[in-house]
Image: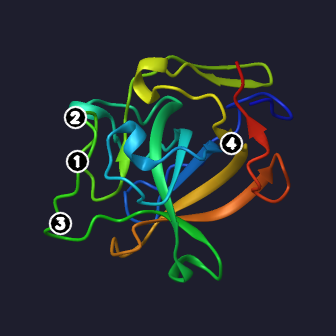
Amino acid sequence: MQVRGKAGELKPKAVGQFAGSAVWSYVWPTSLNSSSVGFEGDQGILALAVTFHPDFDDAAYGGVNRHVWHPHWVVLVPDDACGKGALKVRDIPEGAKPKVPATWPGVPLLIDSPTYPTTLATDTVEVSVPASVIGAVEGVKFDGVTSALKVNANLHAPLLCISDIFDVASGDLSLPGKITR
């Protein structure tokens, strides 16, 4: 993703706690099925995101990542509780045991924390996803979005809402990008 300004230079300010904290992200919504990366199928919009959030860690296996931009797979779904027509990262209801990838960080969201090489340099954000992870990708559609998310202050569903869209490459989330050979 190419951005205006220096990629990753602006970051959310720490609030000192998980509840009410902010997440800033570069996101690629895709036409891939959620099953492509290890979730159950047909769970929502599968998106690759590169995020920064100074108030909490959500790395796989209990790792630390609050101090760096890092990648996630997230499943996005509409939820008017986040605002009319807004999206959120899909919650995992208490007691539910959905299929999740091996690098799921143990939070009650459909989120994955893979360790893909991620670079933010000059005006470019780049993530190298191994082809073996998602298989054949020819024809997959995508878009580019810069956004902010907010952890719900009372930590109840919805837990993580998209609170602000800074820019959408297509202007309308039509997924005009297409992977070709």
Mark 3 or 2 closer to N-term?
2
Label 4, residues with CA under 10 Å away: few <14, some 14-19, many ≥20: many
Mark 1 or mark 3, earlier in chain: 3
The N terminus lies in quadrant: top right
Q: Position of residue 97 (x, y in %)?
A: 16, 59
Tag 3–tag 4 contact (CB < 8 Å)? no
* Residue named by callout 3: 96
Q: Quadrant of residue 90?
A: bottom left
Lateral position of residue 151 relative to residue 179, left or right: left
- Find out whether the residues at labels 2 and 1 contact each other: C-beta distance under 8 Å: yes
Residues at discs 3 and 2 in contact (Cβ within 8 Å): no
Q: Please name the amino acid that badge 3 sits on.
A: Ala
- Which of discs 3 and 4 lies nearer the camera? The answer is 4
Q: Residue at x 46, y 31 (%)?
A: 67
- Position of the C terminus by quadrant: top right
Residue at (74%, 35%) from the top-left corner?
178
**Residue type, label 4:** Phe
Q: Which residue is mark 4?
A: 142
| Crowd tier of the residue under label 1, counting other residues whose Cα lies within 10 Å: few below 14, some 14–19, many 20 or above | some
The residue at which mark 2 appears reads as: 62
Q: Nearer the viewer, residue 26 or 9?
A: 26
- Name the residue type under label 1: Gly
Tell us which disc is closer to us: 2 or 4.
4
Q: Secondary structure at mark 1?
A: loop
In-front residue for pair 179/149 = 179
